[in-house]
Amino acid sequence: MAAGRVDLPLMAAWLAARSLSRGLPTPVLDSGGVRVDTGHADERQRYAFVQPCEGLRDLGQSITRPFVALKLCGPADDLLAMLPGHWAISSRSWVMGRVESNQAETALPDGYDLSIEGDGPVWAARIVDRAGVLAASGYAVEQGGVFIYDRIRTEPAYERRGLGRALMTALGRCRRDVGSREILIATAAGRALYLTLGWRDLAPYSTAMIPPAS
């Protein structure tokens, strides 16, 4: 669906919940968007915008070092159009929301055990096989009117067994407030799964960075 389904308060709430899940600093409003000082070696800061604006354009002009991410709820071409030529698209994903009237429930397949740790606002889920080997994992956070799913992963050797579906079902049951908006960021592969689980696209989510010198 077209960009514009994500507003600034929703983006700020989603990033605040994500930061809580990952132990990152609280996001702040900056340049018309939201900034998170991630502090990672491969991403020192990220700025997220719900639409093109002068603040995004100014950051593109003023930032000269790599490892700072500029993110836009919009197509990659719209993001690149705001930036000088030394920026490049580093990822393309989607902001997705749950369709309440079409939630899918999936049971855990035989031969696996699922555990959930935490009592809110953060929950961590793990699925292991009979040998105790990790097969799938993920997190959920509920705060500020949103319930987000984060770092949802099925290990490659365990794909196509319904574990991702079962994990999402289990984490979804942790939501305490039916008014909390369910939000996640999906890769192309993840999006294909989530569309079958009652989710819909809210906006493309494009990321640009300055490539490091070779």
Image (tube, helix red, strand yellow):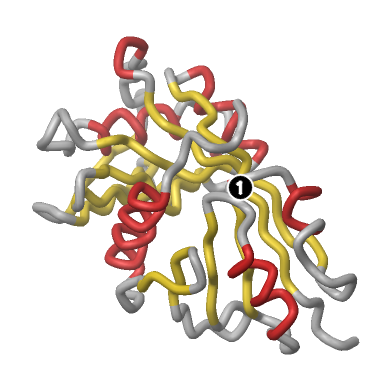
Q: What residue is rendered at 81% in x and 77% in y?
A: 211
Image quarter hosting the N terminus: top right
Relative to 107, residue 48 above or below: below
Task: Give the image quarter of residue 197.
Answer: top left
Q: Is residue 42 visible?
A: yes
5 relative position to 146: left or right: right
Q: Where does the image place residue 43, in percent across and percent down from the top left?
A: 59, 78
Task: Give the image quarter of residue 37.
Answer: bottom left
Q: Where does the image place residue 90, in percent across and percent down from the top left?
A: 74, 62
Q: Which residue is mark 1?
A: 205
137 relative position to 181: left or right: right
Crowdedness of circle 1 by 10 Å Cα count: few (<14), some, many (20+)? many
Near-viewer residue (163 or 203): 203
Outermost residue on the front side: it is: 54
Amino acid residing under circle 1? Tyr
Q: How many marks?
A: 1
Near-viewer residue (59 or 173): 59
Relative to 24, residue 122 above or below: above
Q: What residue is rendered at 29% in x and 48% in y?
A: 140
Q: Where does the image place residue 177, in percent across and percent down from the top left?
A: 12, 35
Q: Where does the image place residue 86, in percent across and percent down from the top left?
A: 87, 75
Secondary structure, mark 1, is: strand
76 relative position to 54: left or right: right
Q: What residue is rendered at 31% in x and 54% in y?
A: 13
Q: Is residue 135 visible?
A: no
Image quarter hosting the C terminus: bottom right
214 relative position to 145: left or right: right
Q: What residue is rendered at 50% in x and 27% in y?
A: 194
